[in-house]
Amino acid sequence: MRILVTNDDGINAPGLEVLQTIAREVAGSDGEVWTVAPAREQSGTAHCISYTNPAMIVQHGERCFSVEGYPADCVLAGIHYVLKSAPPDLVLSGVNRGNNSAENALYSGTLGAALEGALQGVLSVALSQYLGHKNRDLENPFEASAAHGADLIGKLCQQTVPSGEDYPIFYNVNFPPLPALDVQGVKVTPQGRRRNSKFSVSPYTSASKRQFLFAQIGDQQVLTAPGTDAAENLEGYITVTPMRADLTDYGALDALRIIE
């Protein structure tokens, strides 16, 4: 198996090392793991691509490259340049430092890379590590994903899931904010929403009196509806959410026919 690994935390992120280890286990002794990751952190860039600017690519070692661009750029570079002669069988993105459950999924560069992989016709999985007081200060905050990631990816690769003709499935995987031994299991869940917890901005005045705004994430401990991703993460479960690029609200189609 040939696996393309990327992330949105950058080429030097510790979560990328965790994912490379997971990928090597999944690929097996006869497989190949290729890394194409952003040169710098690109958190919150969603499915952005460098459409109007070229993206410089640099080789750091055998099967390891960085791109001066976004996570989706890295997938494009990996499939159409680095692995052009032999495309990957699997795209893995992460392991993100912090969860991409609920509304975070909409902002996530980690998911943006998996989305691009799916659009390119490659099985793709985004992996993220929820952080909380039980794992944030561990020697390895990614302990849960490191311990359980390879087994879960192997199971996903073995599944035959109906895929749409237009927009294939990709998977959003979130590991709970716990040490590895405390993980309760795996739940397949829909995406949730943290109500009354929104992204916002935090103002800052520099020494030169210039005004700056920093994006600020909402409270990550707010529960989503029972049975949805973040709620199950906070109950100790790894969540797997199947997703597609299709943003259509099918439930609203018939209600809007009146305007035709």
Image (cartoon, rainbow, N blue to C red):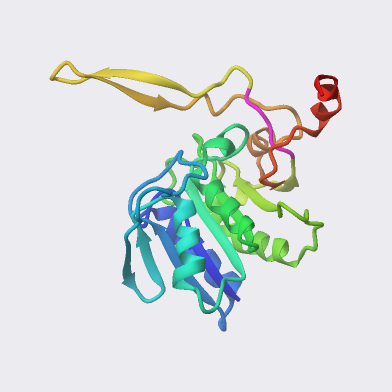
From the viewer's perspective, is 253 left or right of 130? right
Image location of residue 252, percent across then percent down = 80, 26
Image location of residue 248, percent across then percent down = 73, 36
Image location of residue 178, percent across then percent down = 57, 43
Q: Quadrant of the N terminus?
A: bottom right
Please tell me which residue lies in front, 23 or 165.
165
**Magenta highlight on residue 191:** yes
Quadrant in the rendering for residue 229: top right
From the viewer's perspective, is 5 left or right of 260? left
Kindly identify the residue that appears in the image at 74 percent across and 39 percent down.
190
Residue 21 seen by the camera: no
Q: Is the magenta region chiefly helix, strand or loop? A: loop
Against 91, is 131 above or below?
above
Kindly identify the residue that appears in the image at 49 percent across and 52 percent down.
72
Against 245, is 158 above or below?
below
The total number of labels drawn is 0
Against 120, is 107 above or below?
above
Q: Quadrant of the C terminus?
A: top right
Furthest-front residue in this view: 260
Furthest-bottom residue in this view: 30
From the viewer's perspective, is 44 left or right of 2? left
**Magenta stretch?**
190-194
Image location of residue 110, percent across then percent down = 51, 48
Against 98, is 171 above or below?
below
Kindly identify the residue that appears in the image at 57 percent across and 62 percent down.
91
Furthest-left residue in this view: 208
Residue 26 seen by the camera: yes
**Magenta highlight on residue 21:** no
